[in-house]
Image: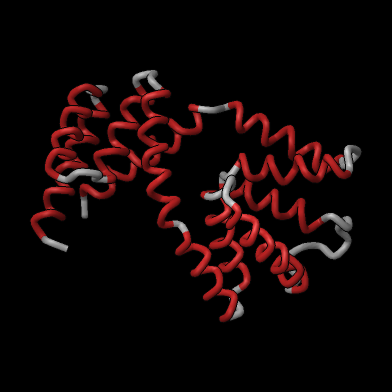
């Protein structure tokens, strides 16, 4: 990558962080928009604007920006399924599962996610045999484990869908009910979670200053 671009990016991230620290969100947005004029579709600039909008109490505007980026990411996300297949062929089951999960989470409403979900389910038995989980789990352990993995990764909507299917088939499932309540709480946090994620991104800018 061009060294001038890298240096320019480093300077931009530093300036954005400084303005965000001072709560100069309008100035930060103007800086990001100027960068977008020079580099259309620039990820750093888009995320900076979304972060500022969210922190200014304008979540709908932040969501619109993030949704645009999600469309782009979805378009490129099949690489995660390919990566999962590659890990699977090498016998790297945990890595394969993680890659498939990322693909499913980004494509929950698309038919391709069902194919990847089946791959995840087929791998769950191998993970159990590896001794990573207790042997005295209930018969539906695989599905609950899948939901737990999604929760751990932060894919709350996907976890909620999995738990919903479990409770449809077994309304008295205590463990699924417990996790369903937990996921509902996480989903209700709404934009607080988005802001926290964007805060983590902004915090990372400080570290990049020293690079």
Extreme-right residue of the structure: 172
Residue 29 coordinates in the image, percent (x, y): 22, 28
Residue that protrudes farthest toward the front in the picture: 111
Where's the N terminus, which quadrant? bottom left
Q: Residue at x 13, y 54 (%)?
A: 5
Q: Quadrant of residue 128?
A: bottom right
Quadrant housing residue 89: bottom right
Foreground residue among 75 and 120:
75
Q: Is residue 208 shown left or right of residue 109?
A: left
Q: Is residue 57 above or below residue 176?
A: above
Q: Is residue 91 above or below residue 2?
A: below
Front residue (pair 113, 14): 113
Residue placed at 40% from the left, 40% from the top?
Answer: 200
Instruction: For the C terminus, give its image quadrant.
Output: bottom left
Identify the residue shown where x is 88% and y is 38%.
Answer: 171
Residue 38 in picture, x, y percent from top left = 12, 43
Q: Residue furthest top?
A: 57
């Amino acid at each position: 990558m061009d060294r001038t671009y890298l240096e320019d990016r480093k300077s931009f991230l530093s300036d954005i962080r400084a303005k965000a620290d001072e709560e100069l969100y309008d100035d930060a947005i103007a800086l990001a928009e100027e960068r977008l004029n020079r580099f259309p579709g620039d990820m750093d600039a888009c995320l900076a604007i979304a972060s500022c909008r969210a922190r200014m109490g304008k979540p709908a505007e932040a969501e619109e920006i993030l949704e645009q980026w999600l469309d782009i990411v979805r378009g490129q996300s099949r690489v995660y399924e390919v990566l999962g297949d590659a890990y699977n062929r090498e016998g790297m089951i945990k890595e394969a599962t993680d890659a498939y999960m990322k693909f499913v989470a980004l494509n929950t409403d698309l038919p391709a996610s069902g194919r990847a979900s089946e791959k995840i389910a087929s791998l769950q038995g191998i993970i159990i045999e590896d001794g990573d989980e207790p042997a005295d789990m209930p018969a539906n352990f695989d599905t609950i484990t899948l939901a737990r993995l999604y929760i751990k990764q932060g894919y709350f909507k996907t976890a909620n869908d999995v738990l919903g299917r479990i409770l449809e088939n077994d309304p008295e499932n205590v463990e699924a009910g417990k996790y369903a309540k937990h996921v509902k709480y996480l989903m209700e946090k709404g934009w607080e979670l988005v802001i926290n994620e964007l805060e983590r991104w902004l915090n990372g800018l400080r570290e990049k200053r020293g690079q």
